[in-house]
Image (tube, helix red, strand yellow):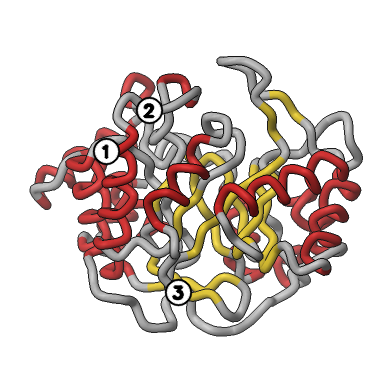
Amino acid sequence: MVAGAALASLPMQRTASATSGTATPGPAGKAGTLTLGNDLTVNRMGFGAMRITGAGIWGEPPDPAGARQLLRRAVELGVQLIDTADAYGPEVSEQLIYEALHPYRKDVVIATKGGLTRPAAGRWDHDASPEHLRVACEASLARLHLERIDLYQLHAPDPKIPFEESVGALAKLQKAGKIRHIGLSNVSVEQLRKAQAIVPIVSVQNRYNIDDRGSDDVLRYCERAGLAFLPWAPLANHSQAGAASARLAALAARYNINEQQAALSWLLARSAWMLPIPGTSSLDHLEQNVAAAATVFTPAEMAAIG
């Protein structure tokens, strides 16, 4: 966790509660809302559109019509933030989102990412050069049929490119009106601070779940700075489950929910700035995931889980 002195010096983007704003009807709104920047309020249960593509996040899904139906159902359930990336498919996830949801409802935020490339199945190569990010952003705008992307995220720092250059490229795209808000993914507190010195940041997307809390320091920084935290891989790997997952499973049984739902409810209770984005290609799993927003663990239960 960030030391107290460091926390005291964190920049505050705003003082509003993370659950301020008005949730739209639907089960995704039962966990309250969270505001990105000062102007985009969304329900605190999102949807990650990585797994609507083919196997290995490569190519078309086996049932494109079903994938489009899944996206439309997510919005019907009150999901207001849909997270994707140009690398998913590649390009397939963004294309399906356009086909399913355009013209977009005013309360729906499409968040996408750039900075990773897919030259072949199984490969995820870094390219966060300013030149690539500019081209990638323009291509995402075209695929999604948007004039401006509400939330554009750096998919990952590129070890070959100075981090400040990558963030600076996003700042230029924002100034040009291509990006509304900027987010980061797979970053440390130090990198987050460097980015904030260049341009306002509204969100961070790092791996985080009940068994992998390696980004606890980033989460706490986000809480103090007023940044949304989007945990990727929000469902713990049950083959590597720890003691906390075992305690969570017992709690799930008492609430008559499954362990995946309990894992999402735990995230929502972990922080008011948490915005889970569970992904699936199954309508049944989508319904179950969104329903987790209705389960509220008490502080005592959270403490018992550890």
Badge number at residue 247: none
Q: CA distance from mark 1 to mark 2?
A: 9 Å
Seen from the viewer's position, the closer of residues 215 and 281 is 281
Q: Quadrant of residue 131?
A: top right
Q: Earlier in the sequence, mark 1 or mark 2?
A: 2
Residue identifier under label 2? 61
Residue at position x 44%, y 59% in the image: 102
Q: Residue at x 76, y 66 (%)?
A: 5
Instruction: Left or right? Give the position of 180 relative to 42.
Output: right
Query: Label 1, on which residue?
Result: 66
Q: What amino acid type should be assigned to the residue bearing mark 1? A: Gly
In the image, residue 232 lies at what x, y percent? 49, 42
The residue sitting at 35% across, 61% down in the picture is: 79
Q: Dot 3 surroundings within 10 Å: few (below 14), some, or many (20 or more)? A: few
Q: Is residue 9 above or below residue 265?
A: below
Mark nearer the N terminus (3 vs 1): 1
Cβ atoms under marks 1 and 2 closer than 8 Å: yes
Q: Position of residue 81 (x, y in %)?
A: 45, 60
Residue 250 percent across, percent down from the top left: 16, 40
Q: Label 3 is placed on what type of residue?
A: Lys
Residue at 57% from the left image edge and 70% from the top image edge = 36
Query: Foreground: 177 or 114?
Result: 177
